[in-house]
Amino acid sequence: MRAADVLRFTAKALRGYSLRTALMLVAIAIGVAAVVILTSLGEGARRFVIGEFTSLGTHLLIVLPGRSETTGAAPPLLGQTPRDLTIDDALALTRIRTVRRIAPIAVGTAAVSFGRRDRDSIVVGSTSEFLTIRHLEVGQGRFLPPADPRRASPVAVIGAKIRQELFGPKKALGGWVRIGDRRFRVIGVLASEGRSIGIDLEEVVVIPVASALTLFNTASLFRILVEARAREVIPQARRSIIETIQARHEGEDDITVITQDAVLATFDRILRALTLTVAGIAAISLVVAGILIMNVMLVAVSQRTAEIGLLKALGAPAHTITVLFVTEAGVLSLAGALLGFMAGEAGSWIIGRAYPDFPVGSPWWAVVAALTVALVTGLVFSVLPARRAAQLDPVQALSRR
Amino acid sequence: MIQLKQICRDFEVGDQQVHALDRVSLDIDRGEYVAIMGPSGSGKSTLLNIIGLLDRPSAGSYILDGENVTTLPDAVQSRIRRDKIGFVFQFFHLVPRLTAAENTELPLVLAGFPPAERRARVDHILEAVGLAERKDHKPDQLSGGQRQRVAIARATILEPAVILADEPTGNLDRASGREVLEVLEKLNRENITLIIVTHDPDIAGRTARQIHIVDGRIDRDIATRRVHEGG
């Protein structure tokens, strides 16, 4: 039998039982569409997180006081306490060649009040560089002016929400707010901007780092943000940072440097695993569709017993019958898979339209895998019914009306 | 051309052995017109199935055109069935979703003939059975007699040496039955061996030889050598 004739015969058989065909197509299409949509959501989540991190700058290194690694057996009486990470330490880092800019950060919570309005807020002490490193924008006024970070000055830049809550309709710029027990003049308001990880920047107050240290009565910075000159020099910058601080801390290696890349890679791995899991769950629906194919093909075989007997009487050998039924399942699953793929892509497109910030898009491997799994399950699960058809006894098949 | 030697066919029904055919020996020559007769359950259909290579005997040998075909593998038997034997059934067994022309074409499709040749042959044969105008009708748009003629066209499109007809008129009214028989007899006059299973004595009366089967054995084998009617 010629391949073209096999396909034609199959197509006619599929059209001859249109309800059955439609149901099978829907079953397979749902499976494939589920894989496509779920993986594109997972992939979207991954891209979203990576995008967030990239917006913070991928050249970023974060210096934390204290060490995350366990050190060797130190005598218990001489237990090490990490040395403070000071503003001078931060300034020392600016002399490293591979470092473009730094922003020392001190963080604490303090009561912020204006007039009779009073609320607790996160207070970030930093320098003018903070604006650039964190890719922030100022909505009104200006940011902290470039100045010696060791000098305290009573100026503050407030988040959009803080401005709204403390000042309401009144003019905020030039107003004096009380933070803790000190007074600061508002010189700027941050642009309302939702994209940030960690602290919600709409609800912070930024003051000069020295002022913050005084306010919180501490000498130690919370961390230092360091921007390397290029992505390639990050490892080099990391080494230089550790060496520099070590030299200043009497040879003690008591800081931790996290690179943005490492954080990014971790998230990337987690989210990819998540996507794979979700895809695996969706693939189960494909296997279910495969079992459905098997059931329906078995029904088809018993429905078409007379036809199979006839084909045998007309001289079709067993393998031709097998080929006919497997082809039928194959065509079905291919068509179902393509339908499902289109439905899935349409679904992703609609989600993409509904949430423009969320970068949906199914990865190519998921599409290929879904189509392959659909086709393979279709073929595998049709082998049993097809063999049953091929082994049908023509005498019995034809004896029935 | 058909030689059966000591053919037995046993079935297991429950724990009982049923001898559907018991040591049947039979010779049928090319171009013969034979009726196989007998009561229900006598084994006449089993005999036809064995001649048509749809069933294998439990014992004995079957020689077709000088070749022992008893134990050939399925694929070879399929080819012999396709090339040498045409079947006509009581219930027509047309594929309902295919048109008359497509049903007729089926053996050619299975044999892998190129489409152009198929079309020419189908047109020719449907013309011969008088269904040229009905070729694009589905079976449910055809009368019983027309359906059986499509089935005959399908059985003869590969120019077989034998036509095996199992109660070909059993499901038809008298007039259509007569029409169908005439088509079959016309083929027989073109030297195709025609074997009809029937229990209609009128049909048997038209044949040149009647083989009566009772309880799986040949009871009588009468050659009447009558001249064909209606021709």
Image (cartoon, helix red, strand yellow):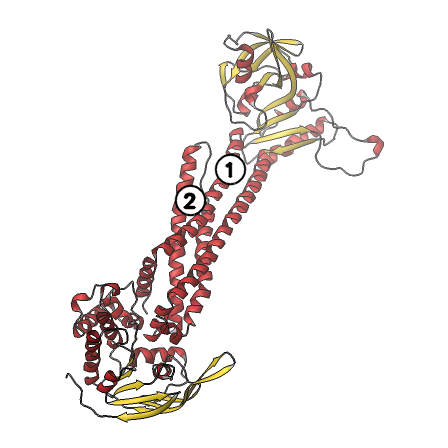
Q: Is residue A178 above or below residue A42?
A: above
Task: Give the left or right position of residue A99, taking residue B225 as reference.
Answer: right
Earlier-in-chain disc, 1 versus 2: 1
User: Which residue is label 2 attached to?
Assistant: A344
Q: Residue A220: x percent and y percent?
A: 70, 22
Quadrant of residue A65 in the image?
Answer: top right
Q: Is residue B100 above or below residue A200?
A: below
Q: CA distance from mark 1 to mark 2?
A: 17 Å
Task: Give the left or right position of residue B26, taking residue A248 as reference.
Answer: left
Q: What's under tag 2, amino acid-wise?
A: Gly
Q: Chain of mark 1?
A: A
- Which residue is drawn at the image coordinates 51% and 8% (left, top)? A171
Q: Is residue A396 visible?
A: yes
Q: Nearer the viewer, residue A383 or B163?
A: B163
User: Which residue is label 1 attached to?
Assistant: A45
Q: Is residue A159 visible?
A: no
Q: Chain of mark 2?
A: A
